[in-house]
Amino acid sequence: ICIHLVTRAKKPCPAELPPGSLGLPVIGQTFGFLCAIRANSVEEWIRDRINRYGPVSKASLFGTPTVLLAGPVANKFVFFSSLMPMLPRSVQRIVGERNVVSHHGDNQVRIRGALSEFLEPDILKMYVGRIDDIVRRHLDENWSGGRTTVTVLPLMKRLTFDILCALLFGLETGTVRDALSDELERMFDGMLAIPVNLPFTAFRRSLGAGRRCRQLLHRITRENKAKLGASPNNDLISQLLSMTDDHGEQLLTNEEIVDSSVGTLIAGHDTTSTLMTFMVRQLANDPATLSSMVQEHEEIAKNKADGEALAWEDLSKMKLTWRVAQETLRIVPPVFGSFRVAIEDIKFDGYCIPKGWQVLWAASLTQMDPSIFHEPAKFDPSRFESQSSARPPCSFVAFGSGRRICPGIEFAKVETLVTMHYLVRQFRWKLCCKENTFIRTPLPVPLQGLPIELEHKPSLSPFKCDQTL
Ligand code: HEM
């Protein structure tokens, strides 16, 4: 009785809880939410609840009470308070439990610090030439060949997979890389399936693929460890293996290295390929911006010898291209948002969010808000000309913010800028499907993966094209 009285005293008074309904037990509003994600109408779904209950409301999603928040101030609270990111338990079982997202406190700082060191500009500078080489080879093998129809999304996925495999694991080609690609595909297939571990379920297949993926990476980790010192550390796994703590011990365990590598592969693969796919779509609908972009890249190419690779300094001149990328990310954020969990009772806007409850943030809520971005549906890269100080902090959040801000921003930027450099100079394209719609799975997928009619611009050499075109 005493325990009951004490714990009851700690429970928030219902008046302090945000308004709204938790719906039916367990199910809550999960089906409506999942349908809204798929139809890419999460923003409307949340706005509908805001209209009914106000800017802070409660619902029940995936069996857990959830607080829905909206606006830049709410985003700031999510990114900078003690709320913690959470991967659903089923996803953790597939990708491994020792990855950077699942760790908190000192362990998160240690693992994220090691990962970030590899993804920072000082290290990335050294990889621009290698990324340049992979992009050219990819375009040559998959996009060239006169007038042709290609489907952009799967090709962009292949490209980002090739870049990640080379830079993270030192795998350029070969059977291990092909096996990793197959297992990754299988792993994705069941990641959002109902987590029932029975024979023939998608979840079971995904669990198996995740296990085999990690086995392959364990093998690479052991091989790289044996070679440490003999060859330069030029991939993520070798770098992580060679990092030591104050006592000279390996900074991350092999399990942490493998799980973090799988996590980074997943985080970096579909996100950047989605961004580049939607840039291709936006540019097809906006010939004026495309022509300015071609000019920007021809200017850079003028100062390079035939076949010379791009360098870090060239990327800093691609200002318009990055603005086009940012505007694409604003309208079609690859990550729609995510959940945080309260590790203690916490207050926002006078309401109590009890320990264990989830909080949902969604990028479109601020990125498509007309009071922050004038005419939000209009594609206008010039919005990003002035520095973000013109907007309230935490309103453009395609990469998140705060302690958990995406550590792969610079990596994604290098991949995108190098790819666009060769794409806009070598090709013209037309969309095969005119509708500008997409669904979310939960990443955005354009109609039929975005088939385009592609035409190779006649050029003087494979990598220099005639500017008058
Ligand atoms: C256009 C491309 C990308 C977008 C839009 C994007 C977006 C995001 C977002 C929104 C988050 C934070 C999620 C949250 O706060 O809950 C995140 C986290 C993360 N991203 Fe990215 N990302 C991109 C590319 C990449 C790349 C290329 C890499 C690595 C090579 C990467 C690695 C990561 C990692 C490891 C995390 C987890 C960080 C942590 O929990 O501390 N991302 N990303």
Image (tube, rainbow, N blue to C red):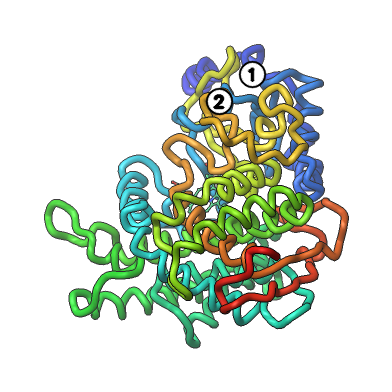
Residue 152, percent from left and from top: 71, 67
Q: Please name the residue that numbered disc 2 is placed on.
A: 354
- Residue 413 in the image, given as x and y percentages of width and height: 50, 53
Q: 363 and 193: which one is in front?
A: 363
Asked where in the image residue 361 lies, by quadrant, the reply is top right
Q: Is residue 226 above or below residue 361?
A: below
For this orientation, the residue located farthest to the left is 247
Quarter of the rendering containing residue 391: top right
| Cβ atoms at labels 1 and 2 below 8 Å apart | yes
The percent coordinates of residue 351 (x first, y second) are 60, 16
- Horizontally, residue 379 falls left or right of residue 229, namely right
Query: In the image, what residue type sits under mark 1?
Result: Leu
Q: Which mark is residue 111?
A: none
Residue that label 1 marks: 17
Answer above or below: position of 73 versus 180. above
Q: Is residue 295 visible?
A: yes
Element on which disc 1 rests: loop
State the residue in front, 434 or 312: 312
Q: Is residue 317 left or right of residue 250?
A: right
Q: Secondary structure at mark 2?
A: loop
Label 1 CB sits under 8 Å from any ligand 1 atom? no
Image quadrant holding the C terminus, namely: bottom right
